[in-house]
Image (spheres, rainbow, N blue to C red):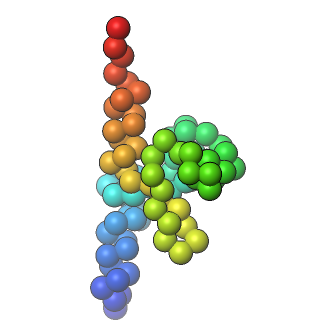
Amino acid sequence: MEDKEAKAIKRIVGEGPTDTRLVLTIDNLVKLGFGSRNTLYRLARLNQLPVPTIEVGHRLYVSKLAVDRLLEGAGSHEG
């Protein structure tokens, strides 16, 4: 049986489609077309990603909500 911490991590990070997750990985961002893996990791190290990163151990995550807001802002055109 899984412990409570493992269940909580699975709920946050998710194991299914990205639309059900609370956080995304750098690889998820690559699949969404944000850039190459190397570029995104370099930007994250330099704290220059357009969304804040969350470091857990050696893994980097970004808030799905922050990514959604970024995409919504990119989709709106003023003029």
Image point (38%, 81%), residue name: 6
Q: Nearer the viewer, residue 55 or 31?
A: 55
19 shown above or below 59? above
Residue 9: x and y in percent read 37, 74
Q: Residue 74 lies in what quarter of the image?
A: top left
Q: Quadrant of the C terminus?
A: top left
Question: Is residue 17 among what the camera can see?
Answer: no
Q: So how many labels did they put on this image?
A: 0
Residue 15: x and y in percent read 41, 65
Q: Quadrant of the N terminus?
A: bottom left
Give the left or right position of residue 77, taking residue 32 as reference. left
Give the left or right position of residue 8, taking residue 38 as reference. left
Give the left or right position of residue 76, taking residue 33 as reference. left
13 shown above or below 78? below
Q: Nearer the viewer, residue 2 or 49?
A: 49
Q: Nearer the viewer, residue 22 or 1?
A: 22
4 shown above or below 27? below
Question: Is residue 76 among what the camera can see?
Answer: yes
9 shown above or below 32? below
Image point (37%, 24%), residue name: 75
Residue 68: x and y in percent read 35, 41
Q: Residue 45 lies in what quarter of the image?
A: bottom right
Image point (35%, 87%), residue name: 2
